Structure formats: structure tokens, C-alpha cells
Image (spheres, rainbow, N blue to C red):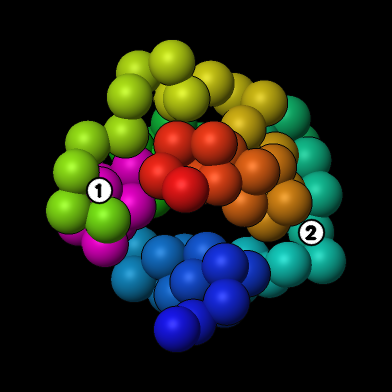
Amino acid sequence: MQNTLELIKQFFINIDRSDIDENMENLLSEDIIDSMDIMSLVAEIEKYYKKPLKAEFIKAENFESFKTIENMLEKAFI
């Protein structure tokens, strides 16, 4: 099975944001990604896990870095 950071990288590649990597921080607060990117990421996440991501997890702070996305995925799906 793919590790979570590789999986997150693949999600970004799938939404045509291969410029984003695991070393980047403050993705949303520094306008590196925007709300459209988040919605595309959510769609990729839901497609991968084959179930919806609950609204309670779709918060700005959960999309600031690979680590915060990883933490969110662990809480939501594991």
C-alpha cells in the first residue's frame, strides 16, 4: 500500500498541481492553493476512499500542509 504522503502527492498530481510537495507549508494561508483546489482534492480523496469526506473535516486548517492533510485523512478514514 502507498504511504500517506505519497498518496497526498498523487492527489495533487491528479488535480494538475504537481508543483505542490510535502516540504511546503501554509498552502492555503499563503494562497499556494485555493478553494477550488481544495474541492478538487476532496473529490480525489472521496474517489480513492470510495466514501464521502464528512463536512466536519473540510476546514482550512486541514489543508495547510501534507502533515495536516495526513492527520485529517487518518481521523476521517482510519
Residue 34 point in image, percent of width and height: 51, 37
Q: Is 62 part of what is drawn in magenta?
A: no
User: Depth-wise, is mark 1 or mark 2 nearer the camera?
Assistant: 1
Q: Nearer the viewer, residue 76 or 22?
A: 76
Q: Is residue 30 visible?
A: yes
Quadrant for the N terminus in the image: bottom left
Crowding near the residue tagged with mark 1, few <14, some 14–19, many ≥20 C-alpha atoms within 10 Å: some
Q: In the figure, residue 20 lies in which quadrant? A: bottom right
Residue 17 point in image, percent of width and height: 48, 66
Label pair 1/2, CB-CB below 8 angstroms: no
Marked residue nearer the N-terminal end (1 or 2)? 2
Residue 51 point in image, percent of width and height: 19, 43
Query: In the structure shown, which secondary structural element does the residue marked by tag 1 occupy?
Result: helix
> Mark 2 — residue?
24
> Mark 1 — residue?
46
Residue 9 point in image, percent of width and height: 54, 72
Q: Residue furthest front?
A: 78
Q: In the figure, residue 11 lies in which quadrant? A: bottom left
The amino acid marked with disc number 2 is: Met
Q: Main secondary structure of the magenta part?
A: helix
Per the rendered image, the range of residues in magenta is: 42-48
Q: Residue furthest top?
A: 56
